Amino acid sequence: MMTYLRYDARRTLRNRRLLVFSVLMPAVLLLVYGEMQRGRIGGADTAAYIMVSMGMFGAMSATLNSGGMIAVERGLGWNRTLRLTPLRPYRYVAAKLALAMLLAVPPLVVVYLLGAGVEHVQLSARAWVLVAAASWAGSLPFAALGLVIGYFARPDSVQQVTGVLYLLLSLFGGLWVPVETMPAIMRTVAEWTPVYWVSQLARSPIFPGQTVDWHVLAVVAGWTALLGLIAYRGFRADAARA
């Protein structure tokens, strides 16, 4: 499994399209939005709020695209070839999940460095650690969603499905437009997306005096479990067809 993970990581990191959308795009959006908007949102510094949002946008893009590659490999018959090797099918899925979580790190690091160095985001050491940990751990439901896309999308349409999905989730989940400024109906729609809850979890340390909301944590865990179960069913169906 570790051998395959290293191979897959090297192969994926050579994908310039993935690096552009998951690292460069959120970094540019941070610089643009950070200069356009100053002040505070709900008691939090606007620059910090946007920084966390753009970090999540990049991490979500990386994890969704990583999982979506399963559909391409299914179309090429690569997964059937791997079944002739000692790599067990469930280890293949575990490697894909681990790779997705690994790819979530570079967007977060780049966006946080720009936030601190260019946008002058000032947080306590504890808040930085909590934001980073919550953002990275919050990428897990999107990694599971990537697996869902990988096992249910057609190989020739997976890129379109992934692109449209993460753009819609970013828009309606409150990554591009603060949920606090949305009309009431859009706030209701936002609460039905996993992005909203993950963002609430990741942003909570930047609000003065705010502690972990266990309700938010439970909803994020619920989304992860639900998407993981759907991905598992897709995996079982794919294994039965092989």
Image (cartoon, rainbow, N blue to C red):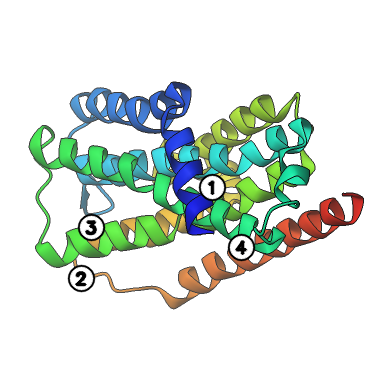
Measured Cα–Cα span from mark 3 to mark 1? 21 Å
Sort mark 2 into few (<14), some (14-19) or many (20+) by Cα contacts within 10 Å: few
Residue 232 at what x, y percent from top left?
A: 74, 61
Residue 34 lies, with reference to residue 233, above or below; the image says above
User: Which residue is disc 3 drawn over?
Assistant: 206
Q: CA distance from mark 3 to mark 2?
A: 9 Å
The residue at which mark 4 appears reads as 223
Which residue position holds label 2? 209
Residue 191 shown left or right of residue 125 in the figure: right
Q: Point out which mark residue 187 bears.
A: 1
Asked whether residue 178 is in view, the answer is no
Residue positioned 28% across, 57% down in the render = 132
Please determine whether, in this image, residue 130 is positioned above or below residue 119.
below
Which mark is nearer the camera, 3 or 1? 3
The count of marks equals: 4
**In front of the other: 85 or 92:** 85
Q: Quadrant of residue 73?
A: top right
Q: CA distance from mark 4 to mark 2?
A: 27 Å
Residue lying at the far bottom in this picture: please name it. 214
